[in-house]
Amino acid sequence: MTVPTSVPAATSALSRSVRWFAVPLVSGLAGLALQGAQAQQVPERRNMVAFSASATQEVAQDLMTVTLQAQKDGAVAADVQAALKQQLEAALSEARQSARPDLMDVRTGGFSIHPRYNNQGRIIGWQGQAQLQLQGTDMGRIAQTAGRLNALNIVQVNYGLSRALRQRFEADLTAQAIQAFRGKALDTAKAFGFANYTLGEVHIQSAEPGFEGRPVPMLARAAMADAASAPLPVEPGKGSVTVTVSGHVFLAP
């Protein structure tokens, strides 16, 4: 009996076919093993509690900002602009003589010119404003300087907390907030029947206190027109610095 010569060729083709299917099988098993390892690395999110704790300190405001404004009217826009620039430059020259870094900084504010209309909608003139700001922690210096700038009107007085003052209190408040967070975590664990806890993700934030605006005492300002050395009345209030610790913990036996 003669054995067909095509059998070895068929056997060879079958072997190649088996080897071809073996590669994706091994790859699939490796992928399943990798997924299993990754699943073991992900912490189990059970018995998780999220909350926050804060610490606040009330402090006297030490930062003052005074906004002064020049205002001009005229028939020609260019003339109004020139008059405003001249008045602002004179006020800047006067204020810079008393300027000291951080104690009293001088800077310009808004500068705008806009038309005035009659009842028929036609332009009958131009009006412009230019602002100058005095800001710092030396309130006496700022008040005296604002009192001498009689050519400008005081339109806004703001009080706040300086960065240096905030940073001085934030370190202690951060420690207090963290201690409060830890105490709250332990109390919560015990309330749910657990003995302890492990920390999860925690965030620490410091609140940025805003400025507190005060109305300008118009009678006092009118009196300063007759006495160039009369200072602006100063009465700062109190602000608060707050540090908040928020996040989650895992209750543990």
Image (cartoon, rainbow, N blue to C red):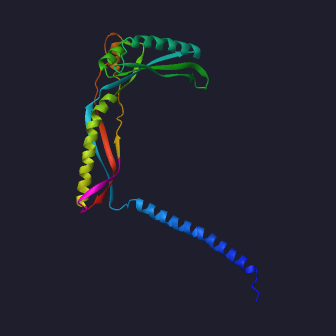
Where's residue 101, x and y in %?
36, 19
Where's residue 138, x and y in %?
31, 20
> Looking at the image, how many numbered discs can be counted on the residues?
0
Question: Residue 96 in magenta?
Answer: no
Classify 207 as above or below 3.
above
Classify 22 as above or below 76.
below
Classify 212 as above or below 13.
above
The quadrant of the image that shows the C terminus is bottom left
Classify 78 as above or below 160.
above
Q: Is 67 left, or right, of 9 in this rendering?
A: left
Q: Residue at x 60, y 22 (%)?
A: 123
Per the picture, the main secondary structure of the magenta-coloured stretch is: strand
Where's residue 205, x and y in %?
35, 42
Q: Residue at x 24, y 46 (%)?
A: 179
Nearest the viewer among 164 and 56 is 164
Q: Residue at x 58, y 25 (%)?
A: 119
Q: Quadrant of residue 244?
A: top left
Nearest the viewer among 239 and 186 is 186
- The residue most toward the bottom is 1
Where's residue 139, x and y in %?
31, 20
Nearest the viewer among 85 and 199 is 199
User: Is residue 162 in view?
Assistant: no
Q: Quadrant of residue 144?
A: top left
- The residue most toward the front is 1
Q: Residue at x 52, y 16 (%)?
A: 73
> Which span of residues is magenta-colored?
192-202
The quadrant of the image that shows the N terminus is bottom right
User: Is residue 84 in view?
Assistant: yes
Q: Quadrant of residue 16?
A: bottom right
